[in-house]
Amino acid sequence: MCLAIPAKIVELLPGEESRALVEVAGVRRHIDTGLLQDERLQLGDWVLVHVGFAMSKISEEQALDQLQTLTMLGENEAVMQEVKGYGLSDHDRKAGP
Amino acid sequence: MKFVDEFRDAGVIHKAADEIRRLADLGRQYRFMEVCGGHTHAIYRFGLKDILPPNIDLVHGPGCPVCVLPMGRIDDGLSIAKGPNVIFTAFGDMMRVPGREGSPLEHKARGMDVRIVYSPSDALKLAQKNPDKHVLFFAIGFETTAPSTALTLMRAKALGVTNFSVFCNHVTIIPGIRAILDSPDMRIDAFIGPGHVSTVIGCRPYEWVARNEGKPIVVSGFEPVDVLQAVVMLLRQLKAGEAKVENQYKRVVPWEGNRAALKAMAEVFELRSYFEWRGMGFISQSALRIRDTYKDWDAEHRFAVPGVRVTDPKAAQCGEVLKGVLKPVQCKLFGKECTPERPVGALMVSSEGSCAAYYNYEHRKHETLTRIGAAV
């Protein structure tokens, strides 16, 4: 339930809603960064994402550790299913590579 | 220790295990409660019980929001969605959880518009895309998830999206811990504090556990090394006769928590005077309701909610398992009437529930061993 997914910020989207494009294992999705508004997020930063919202800023090393933990926990599929599910439809995917 | 050698940090694991054996007093029994369902899942998955000496018991706490949700709330949420033009949305975890007349998924099979969302903001987006429908979001979770629901409601209000509402079932972790400590048959020596809940609330809210109750508490991460280190830290405190809050998960959890998240929660939610926790009964000030300033987005305000109450069968001993009085396998129904496929009690409902975790890993392992034994 409290799955936290490490994701890398690849694009910051200015505007009223605080949103960023992140990448998890090659999949790009928009997430909400409103809960980290005090953190001054930058391109290339890593964050822990829970239900589509960035919860905390972490280091790259911690992010890779966390990915390894999720793999060991057998949660990879659940993680990718959740990440792919963000944004409801695939129109977000156009923003990807 | 069959899993240990697969870890990249097997050396560190062995070191922690040695330290635990050195610190644990052979003359006493230790009961440590991990509060969070994520820890329960990790403990079974990694076989950490096999690493610990037999006089250290890990007791699985109430930190699985799906498990502690009373069945009546599922019925209440689904009853709203029976109205015309309503889309019922919830996280995937909720979809197979049974109400009296079946799970959300079974209602979908009977024609209800039920959709999985992976984020509350997607439920809001769905409402914007379907202006002729009402989108109901069945919100569930501890403080890890509540800020996301709060921010989504703030967005709905700011954008003036009126065909969207939240059926709020968010609960707060501290009253759950308090209820366990207040129970007369409580037998917990110390706590492993939740990791991701603490990214939001920080470590300060646990101080009373140490100060007033004299129980050590260590906020921990989810890797095998994290959990074992937390056990080491708890044993060190007990050995020194101390009780304090320590943060093993500093790399993710700031002592003060996430201020923006707490602010969003305070803006949108207030405490309910009481709320029922499945397996534990009514706990005062243990859940969140939507403030009047957001009542137009509160499903309990906008719709007639029947307020269904379903009592668990008396034979199910979920409360005793939660308090560490019984192990899952000691409950009369475990593995017989009550299985993950057909859960009777709260703790069998979600894979993070202690009975389901025990069933999926330990029970099946023992059954296999017994079969092998019988064959030999």
Image (spheres, rainbow, N blue to C red):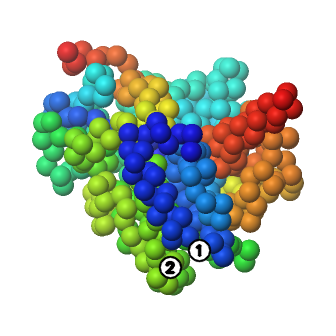
The percent coordinates of residue B95 (x first, y second) are 61, 32
Camera sees residue B361: yes
Does residue A37 appear to the left or right of B313 in the view shown? left
- Chain ID of residue with mark 1: B
In depth, the one of B66 and B24 nearer the eye is B24
Task: Name the mark nearer the viewer: 1 or 2.
Answer: 1
Closer to the chain start, of discs 1 and 2, is 1
In the picture, measured across the screen, residue B196 lies left or right of residue B45, that is left
Where disc 2 sits, the SS reads helix
Residue under numbered circle 1:
B25
Q: Position of residue B328 (x, y in %)?
A: 74, 52
The residue under label 2 is: B239
Q: Position of residue B175 (x, y in %)?
A: 55, 68
Question: Which residue is depicted at the point 31% across and 25% down?
Answer: A25
Pointer 1 and pointer 2: residues touching (CB < 8 Å)? Answer: yes
Q: Nearer the viewer, residue B234 or B346?
A: B234
Q: Report whether B72 appears left or right of B294.
A: right
Query: Please, what secondary structure does the residue beneath circle 1 have?
Result: loop
Q: Give the quarter of the image for residue B124.
A: top left
Q: Residues under labels 1 and 2: Cα distance?
A: 8 Å
Mark number displayed over residue B334: none
Q: Is residue B115 above or below residue B351?
A: above
* Camera-side residue of B43 and A13: B43
